[in-house]
Image (tube, helix red, strand yellow):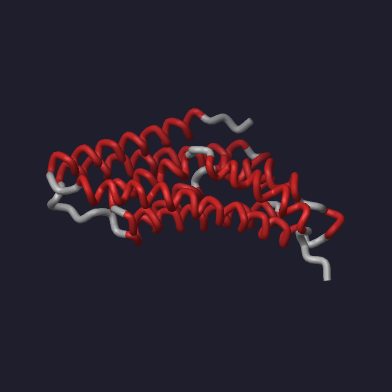
Amino acid sequence: MMGPVDLLTLAAFVPAALALNLTPGADMMFCLGQGLRGGPRAALAADLGIALGGFVHVTLAGLGLGAVVAAVPGAFEAIRWAGVAYLLWLAWRAVRQGALAPDLPAVSPRRAFREGLTVNLTNPKVILFVLAFLPQFVVVERGAVLAQFLILGAVLSLGGLLVNGAVGLFAGQARRLLGGSRAVQRGLGLVSATIFTALALRLALLQKG
């Protein structure tokens, strides 16, 4: 029985998806920042949140709802500025956490997961990217378009999960090795805040087209 996605399509999609996963971007930098804030467990939790958020975007695109975001400027702008505000709030929290360390506990895996999911869902460029990239590998004549989107999205999310998770683990181990003093904790907080602020500026300056 023929599946929704044939092997030739997967053979072309997997290298393209892996190349995208290996390209440094917002997701990778976010996992780096969370690893510095909370250690390896927080980094992996943030990675899972980002992967889940990406899969939600893929599902929306497969259902056709992504076209609404692409066509309605108000929806795009509302989601984009919500993401900017949230990233700036995370930057403020990272500075505060570093300034008060070791009095405040590191960010918990549950919170890191929630933050990763929220950051991904409030980035409308993700769903626009999905709408631009995945349809190149979807064969409408095979039918089951949503199933094709979900399979390809799962491959893309899995690659991101592995790559971003490795980056987050590296940052988390660095935090463990360097996190003994208040000065180091303050420095790590500032580095994380800088990453989150840079991501907020990147999202603020991105245009729809």
| Residue plotted at (48% across, 52% down) | 50
Q: Nearer the viewer, residue 138 or 111?
A: 138
| Residue plotted at (54% across, 37% down) | 77
Res. 153 image quadrant? bottom right
- When the figure is inspected, residue 149 is found, relative to residue 207, above or below; the finding is below
Residue 186 falls left or right of residue 26: left
Question: Where is the N terminus found, in terms of image quarters?
Answer: bottom right
| Residue plotted at (65% across, 44% down) | 16
Q: Nearer the viewer, residue 164 or 133?
A: 164
| Residue plotted at (33% across, 49% down) | 35
Q: Percent x, y for residue 184?
A: 18, 41
Residue 121 falls left or right of residue 57: left
Res. 129 image quadrant? top right
Q: Is residue 157 visible?
A: yes
Residue 201 falls left or right of residue 208: left
Q: Percent x, y for residue 147?
A: 72, 62
Q: Percent x, y for residue 28?
A: 45, 44
Question: Where is the C terminus found, in terms of image quarters?
Answer: top right
Q: How many marks?
A: 0
Q: Is residue 75 visible?
A: no
Residue 203 falls left or right of residue 140: left
> Given the current orientation, which residue lies at the most extreme right position?
141
